Amino acid sequence: SLGGLVAYDMAAALQEQEQQIGLLAVLDSYPLGPASGQNNDIDGENIDLRLELDGLRQEGGFAAGLSEQHYRAVAEAAAHSGRLMQTFTPRPFHGNVTLFVAAQERSVAAIDAWRPYVVGAIDVHMVDCSHQGMLQPQPAAQIGSIVGRRLSHGVHSASGQTDAAGAAVQHPDRVEET
């Protein structure tokens, strides 16, 4: 989603200012612009937002109090995010990216969309969930455990073959799934 692209771009921008990036972890987010070669089905027109928000309403979530005006505002925001994602072209990031992939929806082609932009390894972790389920308790626990290990034991360097926790890190031309 858009959040992962924002995190990636912030990390690349900080590098341009000679700041060190200790860990760049991206949750199921991929460049979708023309250069990526990806088919983009993420825009406000293709998401049945009302259906999703109605489901949240029935569960008693935040959507319980949404008015028609709120629905329209959320739909407009989703459409705008989709347009931003379609026009975004990543700048190079010099280092490794830890990429969490919603295994129920993604293919290697989507993962490969990062390759032209990452000057380092792409450490892929398949998470058994959909994109929308990434932050549900079980997937979030899996993601949190991996990020926690990276932060507490040191993260992988662009030149190393393993991180401080001993996890394998692949070369930029390969993806290792865990």
Image (tube, helix red, strand yellow):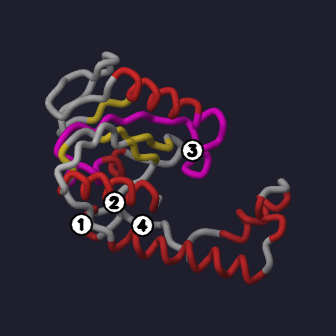
| Cα distance between the residues tagged 2 and 1 | 9 Å
* Mark 3 burial class by Cα count in 10 Å: few <14, some 14-19, many 20+: many
Look at label 1 and name its amino acid: Ala
Which range of residues does the magenta coloring cover?
A: 112-140
- Left or right of 144: which side holds 162? left
- Residue type (three-letter) at the residue carrying disc 4: Asn
Residue 87 in percent (x, y) is at 33, 74
**Position of residue 121 measured from the top left corner of the image (x, y, whole percent):** 23, 37
**Residue situated in front as seen by the camera: 13 or 87:** 13
| Label 1 sits on residue | 35
Q: Residue at x 83, y 69 (%)?
A: 65
Between 36 and 123, the residue placed more toward the observer is 123
Secondary structure state at the residue bearing disc 1: helix
* Residues at marks 4 and 3, CA–CA distance in whole angstroms: 19 Å
SS at circle 2: loop
Q: Are marks 3 and 1 in contact (CB under 8 Å)?
A: no
Residue highlighted by disc 3: 134
